[in-house]
């Protein structure tokens, strides 16, 4: 009887030890709060198979299930702030929505135009309204093939056939490569120097379209590569987009994509468009190619976070697809740079909230077999306001005080 009792006690102690160790392990992996990179890493691993690129504390998460989009990043390791907006509720629900599946992601691959007679978001004969609007599956729900990956690079691919509003069929291959940038790369990319205490994370995407069908012509519709980044909004976020003050164009900033953006949410002055990124009122703005500069940004004063997007604006090229939701008189007078602030629609529902920084390639008149490439870099800096101000001054020649004081 004594032997049985001793064996029972030993078994109990071992069970307790294993259980306690297991609980400690669960506690350790669950200790990251919502809003941290570690939380989002664990969350995305639960529902997808993300690819993680990392260099020290700089990390990014990319999802093959969501078209090779960069879901989020951090400059401070697992415990650092998660910098992309992720729709946890939608992803965890497993639902597939009708018009768009806004799962989030701070850089997602897309194609334009969205509206007009050459739209790929509306079928022939549709009305240009939310009920008929449909995001193509290859930029919404389809999984991309993971071609290759290592610690600092990943490559994704897919093949597409799609008709536009005018019933022209596009056939093309998509290839998307993403490179994690180290501090030296970031300094070279932006032409800046920054203090050692500044935390940074950056990446470059190289996006390629190869025409595998018939020639693409203006009279039947062209496509553009469209990159959209979804970020976390707050009352302390100000989007700022520089523009050429001495250029000639029909407008400086297009502010009526949906309803006209009110003057208390958009200020255009002294070579900058300042736009609120609070996720509280739906609106979109655009900068035409004649005015556009290859750089835009946002500043989150609460989190001391400076975000910079650098793209390509070819000199002298003015044909950009027009994404306005209407039959267009000028289908190639579109914008090169856009920003969107999410907010409730008429029925009170909302996709986010989030805000977006968007860039587009020129309209692509590809002949059969031809390839176009479009590159973009997204870079985040976290530090003191003094440190971030020095970076902002170097890149944009504007102070953070001017940005914060715009509204």
Image (cartoon, rainbow, N blue to C red):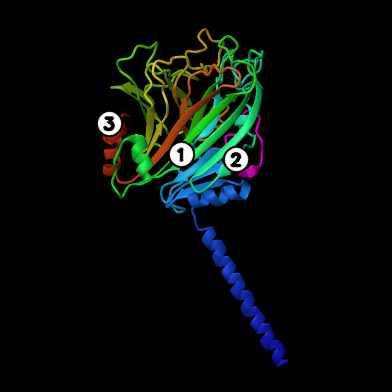
Q: Is residue 191 left or right of residue 368?
A: left
Query: What crowding class fits label 3: few (fewer than 14 Cα within 10 Å), some (14-19), or many (20 or more)?
Result: some
Q: Residue at x 50, y 52 (%)?
A: 38
Q: Quadrant of the C terminus?
A: top left
3D distance between C-alphas at marks 3 and 2: 41 Å
Q: Earlier in the sequence, mark 1 or mark 2?
A: 2
Asked if the residues shown at circle 1 and circle 2 are in contact, with their CB atoms under 8 angstroms apart, the answer is no
Secondary structure found at label 1: loop
Q: Earlier in the sequence, mark 1 or mark 3?
A: 1
| Segment tinted magenta in the rendering | 90-105
Q: Quadrant of the N terminus?
A: bottom right
* Residue pointed to by mark 1: 232
Q: State which quadrant residue 238 falls in.
A: top left
3D distance between C-alphas at marks 1 and 2: 30 Å
**Residue 373, position as x, y percentages in the image:** 50, 27
User: Can see residue 143?
Assistant: yes
**Residue 292, position as x, y percentages in the image:** 38, 21
Secondary structure found at label 2: strand
Q: Residue at x 42, y 26 (%)?
A: 312
Q: Earlier in the sequence, mark 3 or mark 2?
A: 2
Residue 97 sits inside the magenta stretch: yes
Residue 295: image tag: none
* Residue pointed to by mark 3: 398
Q: Nearer the viewer, mark 1 or mark 3?
A: 3
Residue 104 sits inside the magenta stretch: yes
Asked if 375 appears above or below 367 in the picture, the reply is: below
* Residue pointed to by mark 2: 147
Asked if 60 appears above or below 190 in the picture, the reply is: below
Main secondary structure found in the magenta portion: loop
Q: State which quadrant residue 288 falls in.
A: top left
């Amino acid at each position: 009887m004594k032997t049985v009792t001793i064996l029972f006690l030993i078994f109990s102690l071992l069970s307790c030890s294993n259980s306690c160790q297991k609980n400690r392990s669960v506690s350790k992996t669950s200790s990251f709060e919502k809003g941290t990179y570690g939380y989002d890493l664990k969350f995305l691993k639960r529902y997808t198979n993300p690819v993680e690129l990392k260099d020290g504390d700089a990390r990014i998460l990319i999802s093959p299930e969501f078209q090779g989009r960069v879901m989020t990043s951090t400059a401070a390791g697992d415990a650092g702030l998660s910098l992309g907006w992720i729709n946890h509720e939608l992803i965890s629900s497993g639902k597939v929505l009708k018009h768009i599946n806004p799962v989030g992601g701070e850089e997602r691959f897309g194609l334009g135009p969205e509206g007009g007679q050459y739209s790929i978001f509306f079928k022939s004969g549709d009305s240009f309204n939310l009920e008929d609007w449909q995001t193509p599956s290859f930029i919404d729900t389809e999984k991309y093939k993971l071609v290759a990956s290592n610690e600092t690079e990943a490559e994704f691919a897919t093949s597409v056939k799609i008709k536009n509003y005018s019933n022209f069929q596009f056939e093309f291959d998509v290839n998307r490569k993403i490179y994690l940038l180290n501090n030296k790369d970031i300094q070279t990319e932006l032409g800046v120097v920054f203090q050692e205490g500044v935390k940074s994370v950056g990446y470059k995407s190289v996006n390629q379209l190869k025409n595998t069908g018939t020639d693409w012509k203006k009279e039947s519709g062209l496509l553009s590569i469209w990159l959209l980044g979804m970020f976390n909004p707050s009352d302390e976020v100000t989007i700022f987009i520089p523009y050429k003050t001495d250029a000639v164009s029909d407008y400086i900033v297009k502010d009526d994509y949906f309803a006209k953006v009110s003057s208390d949410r958009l200020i255009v002055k002294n070579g900058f468009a300042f736009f609120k990124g609070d996720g509280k009122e739906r609106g979109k703005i655009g900068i035409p190619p004649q005015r556009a500069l290859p750089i835009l940004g946002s500043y989150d004063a609460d989190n001391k976070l400076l975000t910079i997007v650098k793209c390509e604006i070819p000199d002298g090229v003015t044909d950009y697809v027009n994404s306005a939701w209407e039959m267009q008189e000028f289908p190639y007078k579109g914008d090169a740079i856009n920003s969107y602030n999410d907010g409730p629609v008429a029925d009170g529902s909302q996709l986010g909230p989030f805000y977006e920084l968007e860039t587009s390639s020129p309209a692509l008149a590809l002949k059969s077999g031809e390839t176009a490439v479009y590159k973009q870099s997204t870079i985040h800096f976290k530090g003191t306001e003094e440190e971030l101000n020095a970076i902002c001054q170097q890149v944009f020649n504007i102070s953070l005080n001017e940005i914060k004081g715009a509204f």
